[in-house]
Image (spheres, rainbow, N blue to C red):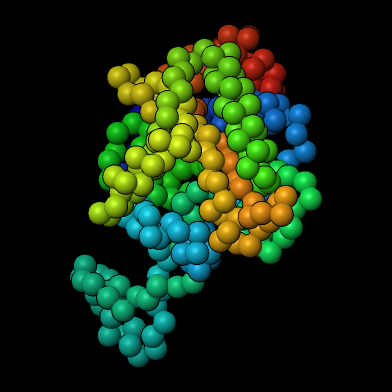
């Protein structure tokens, strides 16, 4: 990561996995939004901008807490009395545990942009596929600080909720399309079967099952010298969210698929490939980014 204020890469804050975005980097983020919008103009997506928090009850029902408790960030607050705080307040300046009486609230930090979508469809019977595009600032308590491994990051997702047949065909078509788009952007992309970082004694079983059923595909590209990471993924959740939230399609619990883009990682990959000054990028690359309207 760059530490110069005039650079186009994220700026270090001194906190692992948390960075600031200078104007040059934000221009690339804008180009990516334009490019994804152009890429998906063939479908009637309903666009939602998601807040960086989500109901704790929703994330518990969705199974995230059981599967990835190590990645989840919770929101705590002080619910005591003013007199109680008067006793704790001196600990702020002395470096003591002023937070010892903080209690968990009804919100958690959003770990992925798509989770609120399923709750909005709760109890619905879908006569046609639901198609939603969402963007959110997400948080995951990542254990490493390698380039691109951020704790606070932006995710843009395409989500569809429908029958199993639709979701599988939709995901396959979008995966092929995004792979081709990355090639047009000049990125050396590989598409690989992947698994999620499940936590706990059963993680190896879950990961093996996920790979065997090819539920998750990752698109991996270089994001820095010597570092290749997943910048997008195409996921099929089967009927998990349909059963959890009582959504039906075709007379059965609805299936769901999503394609997720990590905007910061993808921006880093483009800068690593073409340089920090996006106005000097090749014309064909800018054309693939929706015509380069923000460059």
Residue 254 is situated, as x and y percent measured from the top left of the image, at 64, 51
* Residue extending farthest front: 251
Q: How many labels does the image show?
A: 0
Residue at 46 percent of width and 23 percent of height: 191
Q: Is residue 93 above or below residue 281?
A: below
Quarter of the image with the N terminus is top left
Residue at 32 percent of width and 24 percent of height: 227
Q: Is residue 283 above or below residue 244?
A: above
> Does residue 283 show up?
yes
Q: Give the side of residue 7 with respect to residue 254, left or right.
A: left
Q: Give the side of residue 108 with respect to residue 102, left or right.
A: right
118 or 285: nearer the viewer: 118
Residue 177 is situated, as x and y percent measured from the top left of the image, at 62, 22
Q: Could you say which quadrant of the image residue 265 lies in?
A: top left
Residue at 58 percent of width and 17 percent of height: 180
Residue 146 is situated, as x and y percent measured from the top left of the image, at 30, 33
Q: Give the side of residue 162 with respect to residue 80, left or right.
A: right
Q: Could you say which quadrant of the image residue 226 lies in?
A: top left
Quarter of the image with the C terminus is top right
Residue 217 is situated, as x and y percent measured from the top left of the image, at 47, 31
118 or 147: nearer the viewer: 118
Q: Is residue 33 above or below residue 132?
A: above
212 or 237: nearer the viewer: 212
Residue at 54 percent of width and 41 percent of height: 236
């Amino acid at each position: 990561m760059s530490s110069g204020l005039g650079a186009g890469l994220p700026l270090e804050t001194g906190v692992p996995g948390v960075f600031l975005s200078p104007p040059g980097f934000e221009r690339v983020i804008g180009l990516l939004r334009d490019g994804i919008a152009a890429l998906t103009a063939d479908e009637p997506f309903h666009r939602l901008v998601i807040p960086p928090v989500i109901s704790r009850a929703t994330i518990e029902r969705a199974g995230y807490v059981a599967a990835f408790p190590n990645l989840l960030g919770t929101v705590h607050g002080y619910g005591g009395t003013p007199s109680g705080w008067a006793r704790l307040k001196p600990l702020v300046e002395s470096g003591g545990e002023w937070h010892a009486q903080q209690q968990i609230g009804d919100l958690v930090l959003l770990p992925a942009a798509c989770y609120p979508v399923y709750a909005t469809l709760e109890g619905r019977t879908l006569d046609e596929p639901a198609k939603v595009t969402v963007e959110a600032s997400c948080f995951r308590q990542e254990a490493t600080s390698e380039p691109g491994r951020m704790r606070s990051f932006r995710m843009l997702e395409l989500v569809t909720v429908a029958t199993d047949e639709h979701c599988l065909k939709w995901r396959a078509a979008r995966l092929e399309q995004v792979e081709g788009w990355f090639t047009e952007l000049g990125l050396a992309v590989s598409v690989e079967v992947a698994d999620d970082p499940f936590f706990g004694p059963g993680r190896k079983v879950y990961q093996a099952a996920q790979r065997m059923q090819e539920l998750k595909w990752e698109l991996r590209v270089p994001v820095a010298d010597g570092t290749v990471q997943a910048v997008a993924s195409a996921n099929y959740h089967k009927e998990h969210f349909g059963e959890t939230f009582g959504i039906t399609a075709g007379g059965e619990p609805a299936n769901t698929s999503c394609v997720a883009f990590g905007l910061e990682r993808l921006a880093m990959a483009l800068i690593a490939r073409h340089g920090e000054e996006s106005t000097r990028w090749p014309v064909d690359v800018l054309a693939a980014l929706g015509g380069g309207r923000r460059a």
